[in-house]
Amino acid sequence: MICSCEVLTPLGGTGVPTVFMENNQKWLSSYTWYTSAVKGVGNARNELLKKATAPLVLWLDSDIELEFDPVPVLYGIMQKFNVSGVCAGQLTVGSKWFLKVAAEMDRLEIERHGGVKIVDARAFQCALYKREDLLKIGGFNPVFDVAGEDNDVIRRMISEGLLVLHTNKILVNHHVNEQTYWRKFKGYHKGFNQLDTTMKNEYQPEVQRSAFDFSMLCRMPLKYPLYKLKEKLSIK
């Protein structure tokens, strides 16, 4: 390994299946791997952060799939730009029509930045971080028990002058639970409301109350408006 690293997978409060690991067994054996059963995603991440001792921590959500070890690529970008963290891009996987819309939104985002950009929010589905920098800002706020903990951490890191990058050199397959997909939007909405109450003037992060995207309308003129309608209804 280039540098000592541990894999952290928060299972508590996320309602997702175990990691899709068919092709990952070889590289996972190279790292110490922690999971958490603590309720609430903010608390779960803090528990794992306290257990970790390595200089680097790889956050790996339990509903994604990777075909190879992401650490060398993520670490190379981290070293090149001297940043606190680097996260991978994602592509939603699923057979339902609404998951195909989500996948197309992911593809549009990938096209919009073909390489590396500064992260505004949501940077933990597959991401390599310097453990000391996460500890420096006090870890995760436990008030975020469903969603928003990643937005909040990124906001506080940027306010301290610590940058995180997003790269599309690595893409993870995000296997969404089709039965709970729309129900989760209520949880996301709760997290964003909590984010609003803890907002500070120093930095206003991007949040996932996404506006209507006319580029997506051109791609999917029928399905995308229906998707946005279901998204709106799901958070009422």
Image: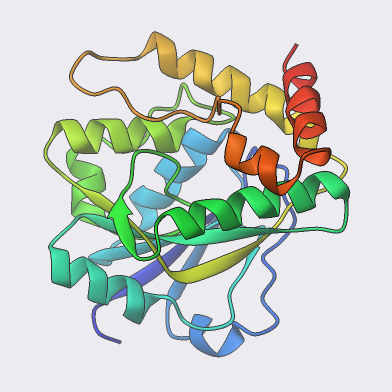
**Quadrant in the picture for the C terminus:** top right
132 or 230, which lies in front?
230
Q: Residue at x 61, y 27 (%)?
A: 212
Q: Residue at x 43, y 19 (%)?
A: 195
184 or 13, which lies in front?
184
Residue 197 figure quarter: top left
Relative height, residue 233 to residue 164 (above, below): above
Residue 93 figure quarter: bottom right
Residue 125 visible here: no
Q: Residue at x 59, y 30 (%)?
A: 146
Residue 186 figure quarter: top right
36 or 205, which lies in front?
205
Q: Can you give x and y, in whole percent of width and height, for residue 83 in the image?
A: 17, 57
Residue 22 visible here: yes
Q: Can you give x and y, in whole percent of width and height, for residue 131 in the image?
A: 25, 55
**Quadrant in the picture for the N terminus:** bottom left
Q: How many marks?
A: 0
- Residue found at the far bottom of this picture: 26
Residue 219 horizontal side relative to residue 189, left or right: right
Relative height, residue 146 to residue 72 (above, below): above
Q: Residue at x 52, y 83 (%)?
A: 68
Q: Can you give x and y, in whole percent of width and height, for residue 32 in the image?
A: 43, 73
Specify the color scheme. rainbow
Q: Can you give x and y, in whole percent of width and height, for residue 177 in the image?
A: 80, 49
Residue 212 horizontal side relative to residue 156, left or right: right
